[in-house]
Amino acid sequence: MPKVLLVEDNEMNRDMLSRRLERRGFAVITAMDGEQGVTLAAAERPDLILMDMSLPVLDGWEATRRLKATPDTQAIPVIALTAHAMAGDREQALQAGCDDYDSKPIDFPRLLGKIESLLKG
């Protein structure tokens, strides 16, 4: 059962996405801000991280940079999730170290395809 860390501050988004992932056979761990996400990633070693970019305490951009700069977590794939689907956002996410990018509102089948692709390596 692949383990996914969902870093999302919006409770409704977090609950909806975690339930849908669990129904698809994923173990889901959740964090409500970037700092908690970085801490949980180091402790839990998830197979993949879904990272909201607009987070309190530590935003998703900086949280991803820290994860990718740390040997224990740098190999964990990160998918950026953002409602700011503007020109350049995808490039900015990839520059921060994200392995892929998806815009909100979430298109679950599309996101699932990206998750499965990254987990296969």
Image (cartoon, helix red, strand yellow):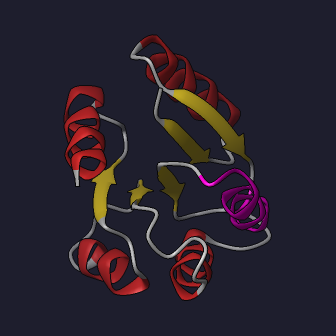
Where's residue 110, x and y in %? 20, 36
Question: With respect to residue 116, does 98 lie above or below?
Answer: below
Where's residue 54, x and y in %? 58, 63
Where's residue 11, x and y in %? 70, 33
Q: Nearer the viewer, residue 75 or 16?
A: 75
Quick one: which residue is furthest to the top in this view? 23
Residue drawn where x is 28% and y is 33% of the image:
112
Asked whether, in this view, residue 15 is left or right of residue 103, the answer is right
Q: Nearer the viewer, residue 40 or 103?
A: 40
Residue drawn where x is 52% and y is 64% of the image:
53
Residue drawn where x is 70% and y is 50% of the image:
44
Where's residue 102, x and y in %? 30, 52
Bounds of the magenta segment: 33-45
Asked whether, in this view, residue 53 is left or right of residue 115, the answer is right
Q: For residue 57, which quarter of the picture?
A: bottom right
Asked whether, in this view, residue 116 is left or right of residue 27, the answer is left
Count of labels shown?
0
Q: For residue 121, which quarter of the picture?
A: bottom left
Asked whether, in this view, residue 25 is left or right of residue 109, the answer is right
The reply to whether the magenta stretch includes residue 38 is yes
Question: With respect to residue 39, does 104 lie above or below?
Answer: above
Question: With respect to residue 36, does 67 lie above or below?
Answer: below
